Amino acid sequence: MKAFTAMVRAGITMLRRDRTLLITSLGLPLISIFVFGWLFGSSGAQKLALGVVDEDHSTATAQLVTQLQRTGALNVSAGTREAELRALREGHRGSVLVLDAGFGAALAQGHAAVRVYYDQSSPIVAATARMAVQSIVAGLNQQASGQAPLVSISEEAISARDLRQIDWLTPGMLGMLLMYANLNVGGQLVQWRKQGIMRRLAVTPLRPSVLIASQVLSRLVLSLAQGAALIAVAMVVFQVRVTGSWAALVAAVALGSLAMLALGFVVGSFAKDAAVAQAAFFLISFPMMFLSGSYFPTEGAPAFLTPVIKALPLTYLNDALRQVITTGANFAIIQSDLLVLLAWLIVATLLAARAFRWS
Protein backbone atom coordinates (compact mmCIF):
# COMPACT_ATOMS: atom_id res chain seq x y z
CA MET A 1 0.00 0.00 0.00
CA LYS A 2 2.90 2.37 0.74
CA ALA A 3 4.38 1.71 -2.67
CA PHE A 4 1.04 2.40 -4.35
CA THR A 5 0.58 5.65 -2.40
CA ALA A 6 4.08 6.77 -3.28
CA MET A 7 3.52 6.02 -6.96
CA VAL A 8 0.23 7.95 -6.99
CA ARG A 9 1.88 10.93 -5.30
CA ALA A 10 4.79 10.81 -7.75
CA GLY A 11 2.41 10.48 -10.68
CA ILE A 12 0.38 13.53 -9.67
CA THR A 13 3.58 15.54 -9.16
CA MET A 14 4.89 14.64 -12.63
CA LEU A 15 1.55 15.43 -14.25
CA ARG A 16 1.39 18.77 -12.46
CA ARG A 17 4.87 19.64 -13.72
CA ASP A 18 4.15 18.53 -17.29
CA ARG A 19 3.30 21.91 -18.79
CA THR A 20 2.88 20.49 -22.29
CA LEU A 21 0.16 18.14 -21.05
CA LEU A 22 -1.58 20.90 -19.09
CA ILE A 23 -1.55 23.24 -22.08
CA THR A 24 -2.78 20.67 -24.61
CA SER A 25 -5.44 19.08 -22.41
CA LEU A 26 -6.83 22.17 -20.68
CA GLY A 27 -5.51 25.05 -22.78
CA LEU A 28 -7.09 24.13 -26.12
CA PRO A 29 -10.60 23.51 -24.70
CA LEU A 30 -10.42 26.74 -22.64
CA ILE A 31 -9.32 28.76 -25.67
CA SER A 32 -12.16 27.22 -27.68
CA ILE A 33 -14.63 28.06 -24.91
CA PHE A 34 -13.57 31.70 -24.95
CA VAL A 35 -13.39 32.06 -28.74
CA PHE A 36 -16.68 30.34 -29.53
CA GLY A 37 -18.33 31.85 -26.45
CA TRP A 38 -17.42 35.40 -27.44
CA LEU A 39 -18.31 34.82 -31.07
CA PHE A 40 -21.55 32.88 -30.64
CA GLY A 41 -22.42 32.85 -26.94
CA SER A 42 -25.08 35.55 -27.07
CA SER A 43 -26.63 35.24 -30.48
CA GLY A 44 -25.24 32.17 -32.22
CA ALA A 45 -27.70 29.44 -33.18
CA GLN A 46 -27.53 25.99 -34.66
CA LYS A 47 -29.08 25.12 -37.98
CA LEU A 48 -32.86 25.17 -37.77
CA ALA A 49 -34.24 21.74 -36.96
CA LEU A 50 -37.86 20.84 -37.79
CA GLY A 51 -39.46 17.72 -36.37
CA VAL A 52 -42.19 16.05 -38.43
CA VAL A 53 -44.74 13.64 -37.00
CA ASP A 54 -46.62 11.73 -39.69
CA GLU A 55 -49.53 9.94 -38.03
CA ASP A 56 -51.47 9.53 -41.28
CA HIS A 57 -48.87 7.73 -43.44
CA SER A 58 -50.70 8.64 -46.64
CA THR A 59 -49.42 9.69 -50.05
CA ALA A 60 -50.33 13.30 -49.30
CA THR A 61 -48.31 13.39 -46.06
CA ALA A 62 -45.36 11.66 -47.74
CA GLN A 63 -45.33 14.38 -50.41
CA LEU A 64 -45.50 17.11 -47.78
CA VAL A 65 -42.58 15.61 -45.82
CA THR A 66 -40.57 15.35 -49.04
CA GLN A 67 -41.15 19.03 -49.81
CA LEU A 68 -40.07 19.99 -46.32
CA GLN A 69 -36.89 17.93 -46.64
CA ARG A 70 -36.04 19.80 -49.84
CA THR A 71 -36.13 23.14 -48.02
CA GLY A 72 -32.49 24.15 -47.59
CA ALA A 73 -33.03 26.15 -44.40
CA LEU A 74 -34.46 23.16 -42.53
CA ASN A 75 -32.97 20.02 -41.04
CA VAL A 76 -36.00 17.72 -41.01
CA SER A 77 -36.26 14.83 -38.57
CA ALA A 78 -39.18 12.40 -38.49
CA GLY A 79 -40.36 10.62 -35.37
CA THR A 80 -43.21 9.98 -32.99
CA ARG A 81 -45.19 12.80 -31.42
CA GLU A 82 -43.82 12.11 -27.96
CA ALA A 83 -40.20 11.95 -29.11
CA GLU A 84 -40.34 15.07 -31.27
CA LEU A 85 -42.15 17.20 -28.66
CA ARG A 86 -39.62 16.07 -26.07
CA ALA A 87 -36.82 17.10 -28.44
CA LEU A 88 -38.52 20.48 -28.87
CA ARG A 89 -38.71 21.02 -25.11
CA GLU A 90 -35.07 20.03 -24.76
CA GLY A 91 -34.00 22.52 -27.42
CA HIS A 92 -33.16 20.02 -30.19
CA ARG A 93 -35.95 21.22 -32.50
CA GLY A 94 -37.00 24.70 -33.59
CA SER A 95 -40.55 23.57 -34.36
CA VAL A 96 -42.54 20.36 -34.69
CA LEU A 97 -45.08 19.76 -37.44
CA VAL A 98 -47.80 17.19 -36.70
CA LEU A 99 -49.85 15.58 -39.48
CA ASP A 100 -52.78 13.95 -37.71
CA ALA A 101 -54.38 10.69 -38.78
CA GLY A 102 -56.93 11.36 -41.51
CA PHE A 103 -54.97 14.25 -43.03
CA GLY A 104 -54.98 12.69 -46.51
CA ALA A 105 -58.71 11.94 -46.44
CA ALA A 106 -59.52 15.44 -45.20
CA LEU A 107 -57.34 16.92 -47.94
CA ALA A 108 -59.23 14.91 -50.55
CA GLN A 109 -62.49 16.34 -49.18
CA GLY A 110 -61.27 19.90 -49.63
CA HIS A 111 -59.87 20.98 -46.28
CA ALA A 112 -57.19 19.68 -43.88
CA ALA A 113 -55.19 21.13 -41.00
CA VAL A 114 -51.59 20.77 -39.88
CA ARG A 115 -50.53 21.46 -36.32
CA VAL A 116 -47.29 23.32 -35.67
CA TYR A 117 -45.62 23.42 -32.24
CA TYR A 118 -42.91 26.00 -31.77
CA ASP A 119 -40.55 27.18 -29.06
CA GLN A 120 -41.87 30.49 -27.76
CA SER A 121 -38.56 31.17 -25.96
CA SER A 122 -36.81 31.50 -29.35
CA PRO A 123 -39.09 33.67 -31.54
CA ILE A 124 -36.59 34.05 -34.39
CA VAL A 125 -36.20 30.29 -34.79
CA ALA A 126 -39.95 29.78 -34.47
CA ALA A 127 -40.69 32.50 -37.03
CA THR A 128 -38.26 30.95 -39.52
CA ALA A 129 -39.89 27.55 -39.09
CA ARG A 130 -43.38 29.01 -39.49
CA MET A 131 -42.36 30.80 -42.70
CA ALA A 132 -40.98 27.56 -44.13
CA VAL A 133 -44.13 25.62 -43.24
CA GLN A 134 -46.35 28.41 -44.56
CA SER A 135 -44.53 28.41 -47.89
CA ILE A 136 -45.09 24.68 -48.25
CA VAL A 137 -48.75 25.00 -47.26
CA ALA A 138 -49.17 27.88 -49.69
CA GLY A 139 -47.88 25.63 -52.47
CA LEU A 140 -50.47 23.01 -51.57
CA ASN A 141 -53.22 25.61 -51.49
CA GLN A 142 -52.39 26.71 -55.02
CA GLN A 143 -53.84 23.41 -56.14
CA ALA A 144 -57.25 24.65 -55.01
CA SER A 145 -57.61 26.77 -58.20
CA GLY A 146 -59.33 29.70 -56.52
CA GLN A 147 -61.37 27.62 -54.11
CA ALA A 148 -61.11 27.76 -50.30
CA PRO A 149 -57.63 26.87 -48.97
CA LEU A 150 -56.96 23.15 -48.88
CA VAL A 151 -54.69 23.28 -45.83
CA SER A 152 -54.78 25.49 -42.75
CA ILE A 153 -52.24 25.81 -39.94
CA SER A 154 -52.96 25.45 -36.25
CA GLU A 155 -50.14 26.80 -34.05
CA GLU A 156 -49.31 25.94 -30.45
CA ALA A 157 -46.50 27.35 -28.33
CA ILE A 158 -44.27 25.28 -26.06
CA SER A 159 -41.76 26.70 -23.59
CA ALA A 160 -38.31 25.25 -24.18
CA ARG A 161 -34.89 26.17 -23.00
CA ASP A 162 -33.06 28.66 -25.21
CA LEU A 163 -29.98 26.64 -26.15
CA ARG A 164 -27.06 28.85 -27.11
CA GLN A 165 -23.99 27.83 -29.07
CA ILE A 166 -21.83 28.00 -25.94
CA ASP A 167 -24.26 25.68 -24.12
CA TRP A 168 -23.85 23.14 -26.89
CA LEU A 169 -20.08 23.63 -27.18
CA THR A 170 -19.13 23.26 -23.51
CA PRO A 171 -19.78 19.47 -23.23
CA GLY A 172 -17.77 18.90 -26.40
CA MET A 173 -14.83 20.83 -24.98
CA LEU A 174 -15.07 18.83 -21.76
CA GLY A 175 -14.99 15.58 -23.72
CA MET A 176 -11.99 16.76 -25.74
CA LEU A 177 -10.19 17.76 -22.54
CA LEU A 178 -10.67 14.27 -21.12
CA MET A 179 -9.38 12.72 -24.33
CA TYR A 180 -6.17 14.78 -24.38
CA ALA A 181 -5.56 14.46 -20.64
CA ASN A 182 -5.60 10.65 -20.74
CA LEU A 183 -4.83 9.40 -24.23
CA ASN A 184 -1.22 10.58 -24.14
CA VAL A 185 -0.33 8.20 -21.32
CA GLY A 186 0.92 5.90 -24.08
CA GLY A 187 3.65 8.34 -24.99
CA GLN A 188 4.67 8.56 -21.34
CA LEU A 189 5.05 4.78 -21.06
CA VAL A 190 7.18 4.69 -24.21
CA GLN A 191 9.35 7.52 -22.85
CA TRP A 192 9.80 5.71 -19.55
CA ARG A 193 10.92 2.61 -21.45
CA LYS A 194 13.40 4.62 -23.48
CA GLN A 195 14.84 6.28 -20.35
CA GLY A 196 15.16 2.93 -18.58
CA ILE A 197 12.69 3.84 -15.86
CA MET A 198 10.50 0.84 -16.66
CA ARG A 199 13.52 -1.50 -16.55
CA ARG A 200 14.51 -0.23 -13.12
CA LEU A 201 10.96 -0.57 -11.85
CA ALA A 202 10.83 -4.14 -13.18
CA VAL A 203 13.58 -5.29 -10.81
CA THR A 204 11.74 -3.92 -7.78
CA PRO A 205 8.93 -5.73 -5.95
CA LEU A 206 6.52 -3.36 -7.73
CA ARG A 207 3.90 -5.29 -9.67
CA PRO A 208 2.61 -4.07 -13.07
CA SER A 209 -0.87 -3.77 -11.60
CA VAL A 210 0.41 -1.29 -8.98
CA LEU A 211 2.13 0.82 -11.64
CA ILE A 212 -0.97 0.88 -13.83
CA ALA A 213 -3.34 1.55 -10.92
CA SER A 214 -1.21 4.47 -9.72
CA GLN A 215 -1.22 6.01 -13.19
CA VAL A 216 -4.98 5.48 -13.50
CA LEU A 217 -5.70 7.19 -10.19
CA SER A 218 -3.35 10.12 -10.78
CA ARG A 219 -4.76 10.72 -14.27
CA LEU A 220 -8.30 10.44 -12.95
CA VAL A 221 -7.54 13.08 -10.31
CA LEU A 222 -6.12 15.34 -13.04
CA SER A 223 -9.17 14.77 -15.27
CA LEU A 224 -11.65 15.59 -12.51
CA ALA A 225 -9.72 18.72 -11.52
CA GLN A 226 -9.38 20.02 -15.07
CA GLY A 227 -12.99 19.13 -15.87
CA ALA A 228 -14.14 21.07 -12.81
CA ALA A 229 -12.03 24.05 -13.89
CA LEU A 230 -13.53 24.02 -17.40
CA ILE A 231 -17.10 23.78 -16.11
CA ALA A 232 -16.42 26.56 -13.60
CA VAL A 233 -15.15 28.88 -16.35
CA ALA A 234 -18.18 28.12 -18.54
CA MET A 235 -20.59 28.71 -15.65
CA VAL A 236 -18.99 31.91 -14.35
CA VAL A 237 -18.06 33.61 -17.62
CA PHE A 238 -20.87 32.46 -19.93
CA GLN A 239 -23.59 31.39 -17.45
CA VAL A 240 -23.68 27.83 -18.74
CA ARG A 241 -25.90 25.71 -16.49
CA VAL A 242 -25.65 22.02 -15.70
CA THR A 243 -29.33 21.11 -15.91
CA GLY A 244 -29.02 17.38 -15.22
CA SER A 245 -27.69 15.14 -12.48
CA TRP A 246 -24.27 16.13 -11.13
CA ALA A 247 -23.72 12.52 -10.10
CA ALA A 248 -24.36 11.41 -13.69
CA LEU A 249 -21.96 14.09 -14.91
CA VAL A 250 -19.19 12.91 -12.58
CA ALA A 251 -19.83 9.29 -13.61
CA ALA A 252 -19.60 10.19 -17.31
CA VAL A 253 -16.38 12.15 -16.72
CA ALA A 254 -14.81 9.32 -14.71
CA LEU A 255 -15.83 6.52 -17.08
CA GLY A 256 -14.85 8.54 -20.15
CA SER A 257 -11.46 9.30 -18.59
CA LEU A 258 -10.86 5.64 -17.83
CA ALA A 259 -11.85 4.57 -21.34
CA MET A 260 -9.47 7.11 -22.90
CA LEU A 261 -6.75 6.11 -20.45
CA ALA A 262 -7.13 2.44 -21.33
CA LEU A 263 -6.88 3.33 -25.01
CA GLY A 264 -3.68 5.25 -24.23
CA PHE A 265 -2.26 2.22 -22.44
CA VAL A 266 -2.93 0.16 -25.58
CA VAL A 267 -0.89 2.64 -27.63
CA GLY A 268 1.91 2.62 -25.05
CA SER A 269 1.97 -1.16 -24.90
CA PHE A 270 2.27 -1.69 -28.64
CA ALA A 271 4.35 1.34 -29.69
CA LYS A 272 8.11 0.66 -29.84
CA ASP A 273 9.35 4.25 -29.76
CA ALA A 274 8.17 7.79 -29.04
CA ALA A 275 7.67 8.66 -32.71
CA VAL A 276 5.29 5.75 -33.23
CA ALA A 277 3.42 6.61 -30.04
CA GLN A 278 3.10 10.26 -31.09
CA ALA A 279 1.86 9.29 -34.54
CA ALA A 280 -0.67 6.89 -33.05
CA PHE A 281 -1.83 9.60 -30.63
CA PHE A 282 -2.58 12.03 -33.46
CA LEU A 283 -4.11 9.35 -35.70
CA ILE A 284 -6.55 8.50 -32.90
CA SER A 285 -7.19 11.94 -31.39
CA PHE A 286 -7.70 14.03 -34.54
CA PRO A 287 -10.50 11.93 -36.07
CA MET A 288 -12.23 11.80 -32.69
CA MET A 289 -11.86 15.55 -32.20
CA PHE A 290 -13.59 16.38 -35.48
CA LEU A 291 -15.96 13.43 -35.92
CA SER A 292 -17.31 13.00 -32.38
CA GLY A 293 -19.30 16.22 -32.08
CA SER A 294 -16.86 18.29 -30.04
CA TYR A 295 -17.03 21.41 -32.21
CA PHE A 296 -20.12 20.89 -34.36
CA PRO A 297 -23.01 18.43 -34.83
CA THR A 298 -22.34 15.34 -36.91
CA GLU A 299 -25.92 14.53 -37.88
CA GLY A 300 -25.36 15.90 -41.38
CA ALA A 301 -22.16 13.93 -42.00
CA PRO A 302 -21.91 11.82 -45.17
CA ALA A 303 -23.33 8.32 -44.87
CA PHE A 304 -19.94 6.64 -45.29
CA LEU A 305 -18.69 8.39 -42.13
CA THR A 306 -21.59 7.27 -39.94
CA PRO A 307 -20.06 3.88 -38.98
CA VAL A 308 -16.80 5.64 -38.06
CA ILE A 309 -18.60 8.23 -35.92
CA LYS A 310 -20.57 5.53 -34.12
CA ALA A 311 -17.41 3.54 -33.42
CA LEU A 312 -15.53 6.35 -31.67
CA PRO A 313 -15.64 6.39 -27.85
CA LEU A 314 -15.57 10.20 -27.74
CA THR A 315 -18.90 10.24 -29.62
CA TYR A 316 -20.60 8.53 -26.68
CA LEU A 317 -18.72 10.55 -24.07
CA ASN A 318 -19.75 13.82 -25.74
CA ASP A 319 -23.34 12.64 -26.06
CA ALA A 320 -23.53 11.69 -22.38
CA LEU A 321 -21.99 14.98 -21.27
CA ARG A 322 -24.22 17.01 -23.59
CA GLN A 323 -27.39 15.29 -22.43
CA VAL A 324 -26.55 15.87 -18.76
CA ILE A 325 -25.45 19.49 -19.17
CA THR A 326 -27.97 20.77 -21.71
CA THR A 327 -31.06 18.55 -21.49
CA GLY A 328 -31.25 17.60 -17.80
CA ALA A 329 -30.45 13.91 -18.26
CA ASN A 330 -29.88 11.43 -15.44
CA PHE A 331 -28.29 7.97 -15.25
CA ALA A 332 -31.23 6.25 -16.94
CA ILE A 333 -31.05 8.46 -20.02
CA ILE A 334 -27.29 8.18 -20.59
CA GLN A 335 -26.95 4.51 -19.64
CA SER A 336 -26.44 3.38 -23.25
CA ASP A 337 -23.55 5.84 -23.67
CA LEU A 338 -22.02 4.68 -20.38
CA LEU A 339 -22.31 1.03 -21.42
CA VAL A 340 -20.46 1.71 -24.68
CA LEU A 341 -17.71 3.53 -22.76
CA LEU A 342 -17.54 0.62 -20.32
CA ALA A 343 -17.15 -1.79 -23.24
CA TRP A 344 -14.30 0.32 -24.62
CA LEU A 345 -12.69 0.34 -21.17
CA ILE A 346 -12.87 -3.45 -20.78
CA VAL A 347 -11.63 -4.29 -24.28
CA ALA A 348 -8.79 -1.75 -24.20
CA THR A 349 -7.72 -2.85 -20.71
CA LEU A 350 -7.53 -6.49 -21.82
CA LEU A 351 -5.47 -5.56 -24.88
CA ALA A 352 -3.12 -3.37 -22.83
CA ALA A 353 -2.65 -6.05 -20.17
CA ARG A 354 -1.87 -8.66 -22.82
CA ALA A 355 0.70 -6.47 -24.59
CA PHE A 356 2.25 -4.80 -21.52
CA ARG A 357 6.05 -5.05 -21.27
CA TRP A 358 8.68 -3.49 -19.04
CA SER A 359 11.29 -3.00 -21.75
Image (spheres, rainbow, N blue to C red):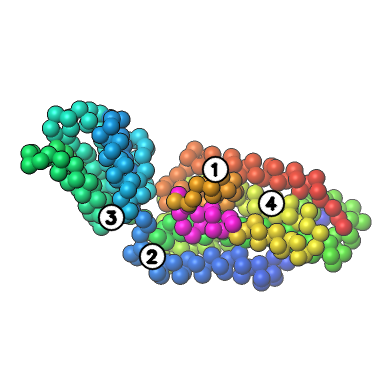
Residue 337: assigned label: 1
| 34 sits left or right of 7 in the view | left
Q: In the rendered view, does 63 fall on the left or right side of 92?
A: left
Dot 2: element: loop
The three-letter amino acid code for the residue at tag 2 is Gly
From the viewer's side, name the closer residue of 291 and 43.
Answer: 291
Q: Which stretch did the figure color magenta?
A: 287-299
Could you tell which of marks 1 and 2 lies nearer the N-terminus? 2
Q: Is residue 149 magenta?
A: no
Tell me, yes or no, whether the two marked residues, 3 and 4, touch with CB atoms within 8 Å.
Answer: no
Location of residue 63 (image quadrant): top left
Q: Disc 4, disc 2: CB below 8 Å?
A: no
- For residue 263, which numbered disc appears in the image? 4
Q: Label 1 is placed on what type of residue?
A: Asp
Which one is nearer the viewer's eye here, 236 or 347? 347
The answer to whether any part of residue 218 appears in the image is no
State the residue position of label 2. Answer: 41
